[in-house]
Amino acid sequence: MRRWMRVASEVKAHACILSLKQSDSALAVVENTEGEEGAGGEEGEKLMSEEDEGEFNVVQPTEEWQTLKPGQAVPAGSHVRLNLQSGQREVRAGAEQLKHWTQDHRETGDVQSSISPDELKRAMAKIKEDLKPAITDTDQQDSVASKYRPLEELKRDMAQLDLLVQTDVQIMKRLLDQFYSSDSTTEQRLSILLELEYLVHQVDNAQSLCSMGGLQLIVGTLNSSDFRLQESSAFVLGSAVSSNPGVQVKAMESGALQTLLTILATAQPLRVKKKVLFAVASLLRNFPYAQRHFLSHGGLQVLSELFRADRGGVLRTRIVTMLYDMISEKELISQAGLDPVLDASLEERVRQYSQVLLREELLEKGWCSLIPQLLDSTEHDYREKALRALLVMAPVCVDQYRSHSSLLASLLSLREQYQEMVQSQMIIGEENGYFAEIVELINALQVKLK
């Protein structure tokens, strides 16, 4: 029987499950894996006696320990032990067997069956055959390849359909050619401007647009008689110059600032002026050269008229925010200029900002009395923007603030209102919320007015 034990070891398992003709059970050589008493784990491999050269019986274990006779084998999952008192091997059913055996198996009394060594060989040969792969690697590759078209065929089809991959520069070149075409309709040009606005958010694309003459096209479209084209072109211009010094310089050279101020000074729909203000703010941001020209070309006067004419507060808030940003960036550069050790680039920026007399111009153009009007708004965002602008303008406007008839009263009223809101925030656990920041702004402004 040793040759049968060698076959069992080839499948590298402690339990072999065999499909037998004569029984639903499985023939196996097992060891006691659950720590049962006795030496069943060591003796399990010796269950098949060498004396048994012919047929041998498969015993069907029960819940009770029973003695194994020489030549008997046990099903997989059985527990086997060596009784040290009697010296006999004993077997009983394992937990899984007891769980899955049906009452029908127990009642039929089909507890024993026989199997010959030849049948065992055939059964194990069948197991090895079942373990072989159904198809070879080559067959599998051929099967997968048959599901897809050859690469050369796909290339030919794409070439026929003219589906060529284009770079952003090629796309912009194509869009500009279509825009210049006399056959293009207004709707098509609006669609082209929308695509360009998406592309110029990337710094390199915006610079490429300038090099291919697209910036002149955008500035020229600002003068269109169709307000939709004006709005879209201002949107493209603002996106192109945003945080892009090279394009800011090109825009100034093309006369974009004068064109934008002209649009703001004339009667235009609100949606157009919103986009134009966006373009102006983007062009002036961190660009002292443009800010100086903005002041010298009457930019503050244009904004003050626009501020007075705006009743909804949308344009007022955008204007005040732009002025606040311009004042704040100059303060930051001026503070950096106090450092005794400056590099050449920072020293040049300090010099350029020193020529931008923004606060003095704001005082002269009456902005000290204009900005407090934004506090009358019911929008918290508008009030916040006004308070921040009032604070940064306080060094030159403090006397006007003190003489303002309603500013002090407005600050007291707003402080009480926002303190109540802060108390409500504290009740729900928001001690440092948005309204607390507004109270801090009001307190800081009141300190400057004392």
Image: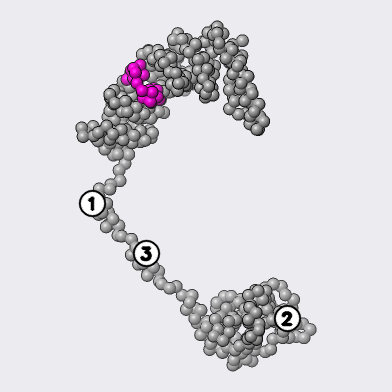
User: Majority secondary structure of the magenta segment?
Assistant: helix
Stretch of the chain drawn in magenta: 259-280
Name the kind of residue labelled 1 in the image. Answer: Gln
Name the residue located 28 percent from the left edge and 34 percent from the top edge: 187
Q: Give the image location of residue 345, x and y in percent.
A: 44, 23
**In front: mark 2 or mark 1?**
2
Q: Is residue 274 magenta?
A: yes
Question: Dot 1 lies on which element?
Answer: helix
Q: Taking the image as drawn, is residue 322 in sight? A: no
Q: Nearer the viewer, residue 83 or 304?
A: 304
Q: Which label belongs to residue 160?
A: 1
Disc 2 target residue:
64
Gap between marks 2 and 1 measured at Cα: 81 Å
- Classify residue 80 as left or right of residue 8: right
Name the kind of residue labelled 2 in the image. Answer: Glu
Say which label, 2 or 1, has the lower sequence index: 2
* In the depicted structure, whether residue 445 falls above or below residue 40: above
Disc 1 residue crowd, few under 14, some 14–19, many 20+, Cα 10 Å = few
**Cβ–Cβ below 8 Å for labels 2 and 3?**
no
User: Looking at the image, which residue sits at the far right?
Assistant: 85
Say which label, 2 or 3, has the lower sequence index: 2
Disc 3 target residue:
144
Disc 3 residue crowd, few under 14, some 14–19, many 20+, Cα 10 Å = few
Gap between marks 3 and 1 measured at Cα: 26 Å
Gap between marks 2 and 3 measured at Cα: 56 Å
